Amino acid sequence: MATTEKVPSLFSHQAFRRVFMAAAASLVGVEIAFVALPLVAISALNASPGQVAVIGVLDTMAFLLIGLPAGAWLDRTRRRWVMVVADLGRALLMASIPIAWLMGVLTIWQLFAVALLTGVGRVFFDVASLSYLPTAVGRERLVQANSYLQSWDAGATVAGPSLGGFLVQLAAAPIAIAVTATTYLWSALCLFGIRVKEPAPERRADRHLAREVGEGVSFVLRHRLLRPIALQGAVTNLFLMVGIISIPLVFTRLLHLNAGDIGIFFTFGGVGILIGSSMARRVADRIGYGPSLWLAGLAGAPLCLLVPLVQPGVWQWVTYVCWLAVTLRIGMNNVVLVSFRQRITPDRLLGRMNATMRFLMTGSLALGAGVAGLVGQFAGVRAALWVSVIGLTVAWLPVYFSPLRWMRELPSEEEGSDVRSDD
């Protein structure tokens, strides 16, 4: 009788275990700071709403300002050490806040600087992490690795802000920031102990930053697999942001619901992403990796269109479940799409590919915020919510009309190179 050899868990793999612990700690730090940093400005410095908004803008601006060149720089060096330096830099920046608070010298300008510089650190850490994963686990186990990481991402997104609020309530906002500093320090220590040797990057005598950035952008936009992946991700982010901005306004201004109801709605969304990322590999193995990207969107479309019909009472809970179905599809796609990207991109272009993707995704979030504001202002907030769900309902079309549609397996790097462009 034939026996099937049991594949060891990824967590028995020393490099992945440490990458996972580092990414988990770093993400918890980001989520705590997301809540605690504005509260430091409000509670310790009596900051105005405009000043608090500036902190939020500065925290994400780095992805648009240096996202593309960061990818080119990362393709010139070993990525693990960039992650370590980014963690240590963010730990020092965050630690400076409680120290300045205790000394009585904390200013709003220091918070602005910390928000901007930790955003820069996050750009380098996130892009390097995505680019380092194939080295840490091997390309053949990327789906499993991404499933674990995306599941933690979803869980931390749900629990992190709550933990940040609890720490602020338990002690004080600057003390919660000190906890964030320790998470970054722990992340750096985890990465420092990885034993897998990272290959040296390709050395080229004719290196030119602008040309290298252009090569990465061109690689993504001309690739017959990466282009629809980028388009689907950008469309999803754009219309998801329209919904995220519109929902609180619909709940409070039209339905006169409270903040707790809004919190439950977004908790259901986080749970949906967690479930979707956890089941992505099993679903993709059963129906195929390409089909999983659009069949889930097609199946969930009717539920997605029910969300704008939200009303207080029983229908409110129906809406929660429908939103969970919407985000479940997003969670599944996150795992599969990232795995596609990592499998078909050569090592020398991983940093630039991931940076280009992050730039496009971040830009689409900013565009989505603008669309939500314009539609909400001139057509009403419920109309903006309809725009969101209609966009999310058709977001799978770029994949459907691409070679990804019937791909049952993830392609190899060589197969991905064979379909790199339409030329």
Image: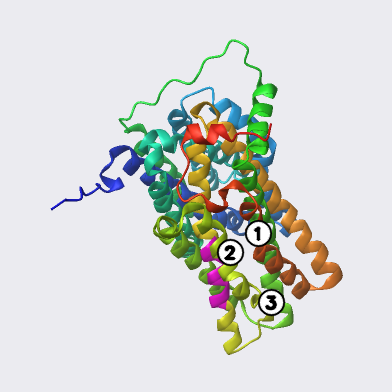
State which quadrant residue 278 falls in: bottom left
Work out whether mark 2 precedes mark 3 in sequence or the reverse, and give the earlier one. Answer: 2
Query: Which amino acid type corresponds to the residue marked 3 in the rendered image?
Result: Pro
Q: Residue at x 48, y 34 (%)?
A: 413
Q: Which residue, given by chain and number where applicable, does mark 3 sit on?
A: 308
What colour-coding does the image apply?
rainbow
Q: Using the numbered discs, state the Cα–Cα distance from disc 3 to disc 1 in whole angstroms.
A: 17 Å
Q: Residue at x 62, y 58 (%)?
A: 396
Which residue is nearer to you in this view: 194 or 190? 194
Query: Which amino acid type corresponds to the residue marked 1 in the rendered image?
Result: Ala
Task: Provide residue 312's location: percent of width, then percent of height.
Answer: 63, 87
Dot 2 crowding, Cα within 10 Å, few <14, some 14–19, many 20+: many
The label number, if any, that marks residue 297 in the structure image: 2
**Circle 1 SS class:** loop
Q: Could you tell me if the residues under marks 1 and 2 are in contact, i.e. CB atoms within 8 Å?
A: yes
Residue range highlighted in magenta: 320-329
Q: Main secondary structure of the magenta part?
A: helix
State which quadrant residue 200 falls in: top left
Residue 63 shown left or right of residue 88 in the figure = right
